[in-house]
Image (spheres, rainbow, N blue to C red):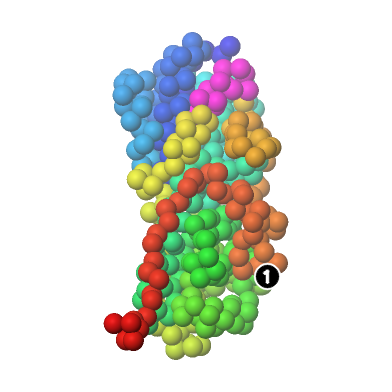
Amino acid sequence: MIKGNAIIGQSGGPTSVINSSLSGIVTKAKEFEGIKNIFGMRFGVEGFMAENIIDLGSETFDTMDGLKKTPSSVLGSCRHKLQNEDLPKILELLRKYNIRYIFLIGGNDTMDTIHRIEVYAKANNYDLMGIGVPKTVDNDLFGTDHTPGFASAARYMALSVIQAGILARDMRKVDQFVVFQCIGREAGWLVGATAAGKNKPQDAPHIMCFPERAFEKDKFLADVKRYQNEFGFVSIVCGEGIAYADRTPVSASQTKDKFNNVEFGAMGGMSAAMSLHRMISNEFGFRGEFQITESLPMCAADRAVGLDIDEAFMCGLRAVELAAAGVTGVMVTLERQAGSDYICTTGTAPLKEVAVRAKPMPDEYINNEGNFINDKFMEYIKPLIGPLPSYTNLNFNKVNLKSL
């Protein structure tokens, strides 16, 4: 058993349950005799390099318990792209604070960060246990059935599209269409989730535009016209990263972040939803709306799913259990068991694989036309987000003067 201190960090965008994973790590670390002190990185690895380090071990049980239902990233986040020249400084600080356990909660880029730190420490004969804890609303992490944070964001999006669809239905004499944009650069998991509350063909949404499918303008406009003719309005859901066959973004964004990821709609540019809105208006002369939630699904604690909170906490607990057992260089995963009843356990995936691979929506979850999900996806998503509300509509019985 390696004895020393532990440090925890959060990176990238938040989720509504990321703090539940933090709570799980701290709770379990307090029970493990190999960990003397529990530290926190204030603003991720960037804060760590500036020695902005806090004492998490001094926080009370009530505080840790309350974090399970607290939105955003309580430690503070960063999007610092780790450079090779950063590694000696990080190792120096690991030695200085006698840190032997490092836990980072995040997505692909975060898993790359912890992988590189763990490998560098090993190459320099420094014993360090590095475990990644998954987090992303995009649900695109390799090796896990789903990610903590996805279920809550999926529920947020499903509820939003249900309610916006009812509004669009009743306002169809004013606005003939509505475009709803989901976050997710290259994965359409949240796009698909918006159909979870759809019960009838006329219910929203009607058309889905997935990042996994090349956008075809003519086909899209034909679908818009077909559904608008049929229902009097059309509800469209798109991923922020939808692109043409040559991979040109529909948003035409060229701005990139430090990790070389395209920032859709950044710097005053046009978003995918705005682009589709303009496309439809120019073609048909329709009036319509576009709705872009951006970071709201990442921090809506009021719509968080209880299952999601519990699984995020479970991942935090498991991370410490793995480190205590001498396991390093892995990310905790969620594994759904076969069967009609939803049962989920934990597993592991190598950090080096998670860091370089992504998990787009599988073809088997998208219909043959490429513009909607299928029943198999509904079987996947419904246990995660739980039951959704149903709303009442009128029968619209016309007045019969003869019966008056």
User: Is 67 on the left or on the right of 13, as rendered?
Assistant: left
* Quarter of the figure that contains the N terminus: top right
In magenta, the rendered stretch is 316-327
Amino acid type, label 1: Glu
Q: Position of residue 66 (x, y in %)?
A: 33, 30
Q: Position of residue 189 (x, y in %)?
A: 57, 55
Report the magenta stretch's main SS: helix
What residue is drawn where x is 44% and y is 38%?
Answer: 306
What residue is drawn where x is 61% and y is 17%?
Answer: 325
The one of 384 and 403 positioned closer to us in this rendering = 403
The one of 181 and 328 positioned closer to us in this rendering = 181
> Dot 1 corresponds to which residue?
369
- Residue 320 sits inside the magenta stretch: yes
SS label for mark 1: loop
The one of 8 and 359 positioned closer to us in this rendering = 359
What residue is drawn where x is 52% and y is 83%?
Answer: 229
The one of 121 and 388 positioned closer to us in this rendering = 388
- Residue 374 sits inside the magenta stretch: no
- The quadrant in which residue 290 appears is bottom left
* Quarter of the figure that contains the C terminus: bottom left
User: Is 389 on the left or on the right of 334, as rendered?
Assistant: left
- The quadrant in which residue 27 appears is top left
